[in-house]
Amino acid sequence: MIDGLGGLPDPATGKTELEMARTPNLDRLAAESICGLSEPVGAGIAPGSGPGHLALFGYDPIDSLVGRGILSALGVDFPMEPSDVAARINFATIDGEGRVTDRRAGRISTETNRRLVARLGGVQVAGLRVFLETESEHRAVAVFRAEGLSDQLGDTDPQQTGVLPHPIRATAPEAAATAALLNSWVAAARAALADEHPANMVLLRGFAKHPDLGTFEQRYRLKAAAVAVYPMYRGLARLVGMDVLQTGKSLADQFATVRKHWDAYSFFYVHLKAADAAGEDGDFARKVQVLEEADAELTALVALKPDCLVVTGDHATPALLKQHSWHSVPFLLRSQWEVPDEVASFGERACMRGCLGTFPAQAAMQMMLAGSLKLTKYGA
Amino acid sequence: MIDGLGGLPDPATGKTELEMARTPNLDRLAAESICGLSEPVGAGIAPGSGPGHLALFGYDPIDSLVGRGILSALGVDFPMEPSDVAARINFATIDGEGRVTDRRAGRISTETNRRLVARLGGVQVAGLRVFLETESEHRAVAVFRAEGLSDQLGDTDPQQTGVLPHPIRATAPEAAATAALLNSWVAAARAALADEHPANMVLLRGFAKHPDLGTFEQRYRLKAAAVAVYPMYRGLARLVGMDVLQTGKSLADQFATVRKHWDAYSFFYVHLKAADAAGEDGDFARKVQVLEEADAELTALVALKPDCLVVTGDHATPALLKQHSWHSVPFLLRSQWEVPDEVASFGERACMRGCLGTFPAQAAMQMMLAGSLKLTKYGA
């Protein structure tokens, strides 16, 4: 999983990052594979990392939408319990009348964030435990623990300035007590931050419990392992029941981890973050370089002779856009039980000519199960 | 319908059965046609003959899943009534304590099967008529007839050895009386086989009534005829309301049957079994030969000048896999009202480049109706 794999052509050369990169190993794999473009969610839809990953893992990216609070909690490796409710927090600035003047409190430093999180740790509300963790700058995550919490709650973040934060509203009758309890905490937090500047308020959004999506073991009878460095991807893997393996930071380390555990698992998810990061930074040349480095390392994975090997990304992150984009993502699947198409290099234009065409990412797992002869016949 | 048409490349040549076969007539047709790959059920899903055929006939292969008992009954040409319940039978071996030791009774001969079926014909249960027919080896089919039978019944086949067969369980409350009645028959059958070896028990699965799928006449206003040699395919055709024509065994005979009835029908389904059989046997060379012979015969069908002609298969049966596979199947559709694409030969790789791409088999009937100008405008 090369995060943010797809790109857009540099106007100077007419080539995308992947087309520009020298990738002899990926090209050879493409020649032995069936190829196409993987559409993560739907035409024109740029996915977040959650839907991008879950679709490739075979989950409906619409039905399985994971709340923002959960992704934040996963992102800091917080061990959530089924009854916990998580929310994303923004530190913000309010004026004397309580109106929001800056939804990000001037993007305070992560250090300040840590100090404020520690300070809020002292806020007490009877019957409620609150776990707070810093993400970065103005971003933090809260996990609420109490008996009988509901996550049917509206955001306090008004998404604009000049207005009061919303109270937490119950969006279902059974959430009324939860809303009252958490509003007490917000009031107490506001009081605790009253003498701070600029971060004198918290805005909460994306209240959510840990979803029960069903695990890889339950859905596919696969014993699955994740080899990912960044917490959010480790968390997404945990969400679908993968074992998250300890690994080093380089792709070479990650492939060494796969090799070490090769016999213990029937499925490996390996996540490479650097391509997405280069895309988000708008650094076309660095993304090309990351892809060339990944290509060189790939031989270590191919040498393990997987029954079925897929190389793709969870979404495109074109350096020209500096953000996730809606473009379908180059995809190759190699199995000895497929009819290789005529694609002989790995890139956006080459994969357009692949036999898979543009296909829903959600189909990838079924193709992998078939390509490793793990499915039985349907119907007599 | 060339059963099991699609294949996989022979590692020695890199060519599939169809790519290896000399098929000048199919190649000419492909050049005059729109081409693509037909996906029977979904990515990675290898279909049985039931879903493979029903999808091409335009029925949703998931919603229209036909129970195993029905396919067995169709396969022996049994004239089922709407209230009948069919089940597939395995002759099996049980030990002194009733535990299954061999689910197939050592694959007894078809002759032994016939003798046992005759013996079970003497088993009487008040209020129940039972029709038994030999399929082959350990396989037989039972059709149960009584007032108010339900098919909401669980299998007795435990799908493993070392355990007792299941009693027939009602999976819906209204099936309780049926379960009791059929359990009496199973007990009596067991008693009747007590002195047999190794086939001293029957295991039943796939209880099902004849489904009401709606006929070709109702769905498409087509008067449809089937020209198929093997019972199961004749049965599948009858299931969708086709007239099943008497025909000889060779493809030449089958096309002569089409010619004879040309004016009496608006749709012909012609089924060629030999390609699938060669694939199941793992006989690459014979499958190539079957395809070449089919190609030679095809001129007789083309000479009838159908408004719309489709050549495809219900699923792939690669000789390398010796079984039905999930691969999408080469497909061509010739009509004077289409824009031929640039595919000029009929094969897996060639059809990948066709204008239809990989498309759901279920769309084929709509394409055929359109290609013979039988559909009116949708919407004003």
Image (spheres, coloured by chain):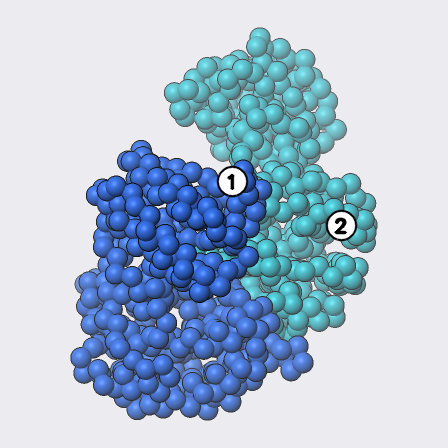
Chain colours: A cyan, B blue
The residue positioned 30% from the left and 91% from the top of the image is B303
Q: Residue A261 in the image: x percent, y percent? A: 77, 47
Please say if B282 is above or below B286.
above
| Classed neighbour count for the residue bearing mark 2: other residues with Cα under 10 Å, few (<14), some (14–19), many (≥20) | few
Which of the numbered marks, if any, corresponds to residue A263? 2
Q: Residue A73 in the image: x percent, y percent? A: 63, 31
Task: Tell me if A116 is positioned left or right of B152 in this view.
Answer: right
Say whether residue A280 is visible.
Answer: yes
Provide the secondary structure element on which disc 2 rests.
helix
Which of the numbered marks, if any, corresponds to residue B98? 1
Say whether residue A7 is visible.
Answer: no
Q: Which quadrant is home to the N terminus of chain B?
A: bottom left
Task: Tell me if B233 is positioned left or right of A259 in this view.
Answer: left
Q: Residue furthest front?
A: B195
| Classed neighbour count for the residue bearing mark 1: other residues with Cα under 10 Å, few (<14), some (14–19), many (≥20) | some
Which of these two is toward me, B307 or B208?
B208
Q: Are marks 1 and 2 in contact (CB under 8 Å)?
A: no
Which chain does tag 2 point to?
A
Which of these two is toward me, A169 or B363?
B363
Provide the secondary structure element on which disc 1 rests.
loop
Are the residues under badges 1 and 2 in a single subunit?
no
Q: Residue B42 in the image: x percent, y percent? A: 46, 59
Which of the numbered marks, if any, corresponds to residue A269? none
C-alpha gap between disc 1 and disc 2: 39 Å
The residue positioned 51% from the left and 40% from the top of the image is B98
The residue positioned 33% from the left and 75% from the top of the image is B228
Q: Which quadrant is home to the C terminus of chain B?
A: bottom left
Please say if B348 is above or below A374.
below
Q: Quadrant of residue A188?
A: top right
Q: Hey, what amino acid is under mark 1?
A: Gly
Please say if B270 is above or below B43.
below
Q: Hey, what amino acid is under mark 2?
A: Asp
